[in-house]
Image (cartoon, rainbow, N blue to C red):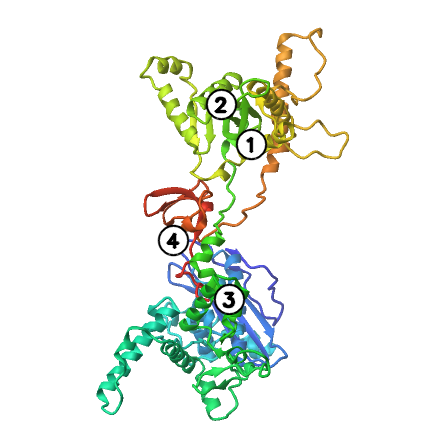
Amino acid sequence: MARIPGRTASTGNDPSAPRWLESDQEGVKRELHGFADASEKAYAAVVYLRTESSSGEVVVSLVAAKTKVAPLKQVSLARLELNAAALLVRLANHARRVLKIEEDPTHLWTDATVVLGWIRGHPASWKTYVANRVSEIQLTLPDAYWHHVPGRENPADCASRGLLPRELVEHPLWWQGPAWLRTKTGPWSAPLDDEVPVDLPERRSHIHAVAAATEEPELLTRYSSLTSLARTTAWCRRWLRCLRARRTAHEKQPDSSAGLVLTREELSDAIVGWIGWVQSIHFKGEATALRKNAPLPARSSIASLSPFLDERGLLRVGGRLKNAMLAYDARHPVILPGPSRLTRLIVEACHRRTLHGGVQATLGALRQEYWVPRGRTLVKGCIRRCVTCVRWRAASPQPLMGSLPGPRVTPARPFLNTGVDYAGPVWLRTSKGRGQRASKAFIVVFVCLCSRAVHLDVATDYTADAFLAALRRFVSRRGLCQTLYSDRGTNFVGADAQLRDLFSAGGQRGRRIAERVAEERIAWRFNPPAAPNFGGIWEAAVKSTKHHLRRVIGEATLTYEEMATLLSQVEACLNSRPLQALTDDPEDLSPLTPGHFLIGSAISAVPEPSLTEERTTRLSRWQQVQQMRDHFWARWSKEYLQTLAHRPKWLKADLEVRAGRLCFVRSETTPPTKWPLARIEELLPGDDGQVRVVKVRTAASILTRPVSKLVLLPDCDAPGSEE
């Protein structure tokens, strides 16, 4: 049994309804039926519960009803019927939740066929008022079945038109619904008609703006330069003249000696012919009006130019420069339409004539003879598509700044994950005194990826052997690395090959070293070629090292011993720098530095007093050291690590990098005119799915390059490329 909230007690002749509905008994078939109706005064909705027992007994009970007064503003009856349907949906949905019969069938009835047509259509097909209510009806009860009921059998008509109290007491249509609702089979069992009538009111008008596309001749689109188009057209026109001359006996034969060279007049006539054809297509209305001495069309784009027709029938700018001391073509330039292939060829010719000048230079050269509405926009598009200008402008795509790798944000022993790079060259002399020879040397910079601690050493040359010697000294002092990161330099690649040979078990040295590094080996990770931005942490260390050396050394030349001593001091300074910005609070703790992870304090700090005389056990001292180390790492996680969260630049991903695009491969050692042309062969996305490295195919080989080293050529297939 289900209880309906509310008071329905009966006193005397007052109307009454049962408060308990047999809706949750086993074997009972339940259906919810709702009716909606509207009049000019009000609209109403009423809901009934129809139950059919296993024995076939049908009981129809009034569940809920609701009425609303029609708005004061005049509204059509069809819209009022739609409001009644929306009211019915809300009421039926509430009744289903209260009775807990969401899974049982719901049948909704209305006597307005217009409303049924609206509900069966898509909301986008109707105007806003109808669309909003149809959308609410379809979303609130998407599984409801809508039917048509005759007006005389619609119980909601009693509420919309009103009944007197004495009529309401004995009104079976209101209390029990239509008579066919109490039969075993009713009109709701018939198949539904989902067809939406075409002539329904409130249908939204769909207006499609269609622009007539003018198909340009193949000869105009075949050539990529104005010179080629003019020469081809001039030859065709000469051939036609010769053909007519042969057919006309009284016309003088052309001079055969002039057939080898096109004259200036022939080339000019060819361009004028194309201009006349283009103007007849794009400015047909304006030309017709000027020939008839009629005013220009109201929406003409060239009305402000005061156009006129010259002796050749070309549209020219009238303007206000009639008395200016300029050439005729500059005072009255020929008007050209913007969306034309001929106009683009003329703009490109002016751009090349100005030796690939900028927007202002190209536009100035263009307006000496021609006037193009919105010409500046057209010139900008031409310069963006110019391959020569793209090569020299050299704008490279920039992907989204990537997330920091795991070794940068994971606590670990100092120099367990290390980046290495070279700085220099610097000059070292063999000994002190005048007249000593100086030779090139390089500074090897090792950087801990986690704590940013720096280790500096000297390599006497740029070979793999010199680097291996520096690496051995570094490992002996700082411990064996787990992973070593570097750029793809020739010395590093050679050292990696020698390390692999050194760690192989084939020789006696390899077996001896393999026994020592059986558990920990150096894994070498190389950045993509020509991608120094992938190693920003060691590039920053190189910059800081050079900063100190330039100010200390100047133009002096040091010996190896002096350089090693100076690098140790520079290393101490770098390892004493705070990992984050200092605050102005005088009570703030001492800043966390890389030196804290190496020796327990900043390397340049004042020595602490000796604690050897203190009475403490060895175990407590060890625990104190462990506690200090844990404290440093806790500060590292809370203070320093959070400063790496934001992206200071490269905030947007460049979506223009895709396979198949043409590009130039940028090189710092050659001018832009020597950069090789390539096509993107394969995208190499990173762990976050962003493409920062690609494989490109040149005429000679396939290269792996970062996208920051590519200069993309204009994509003619992209929307908006032909401005």
Mark 4: amino acid: Leu
Does dot 3 land on a helix, a strand or a loop? helix
Mark 1: amino acid: Val
Front-lying residue, 315 or 126: 315
Front-lying residue, 417 or 145: 417
Q: Are marks 2 and 4 in contact (CB under 8 Å)?
A: no
Quote the CA–CA distance across marks 2 and 3. 55 Å
428 to 140, vertically: above or below: above
Mark 2: amino acid: Thr
Residue 465 occupies quadrant: top left
How far from the left and from the top, in percent, is residue 489? 43, 32
* Residue plotted at (62% across, 77% down): 71
Q: Which residue is mark 2?
A: 460
Numbered mark located on residue 362 in the image: 3
Q: Which residue is mark 1?
A: 542
Q: Are marks 4 and 3 in contact (CB under 8 Å)?
A: no
How far from the left and from the top, in percent, is residue 32? 46, 64
| Mark with earlier residue (4, 3) | 3
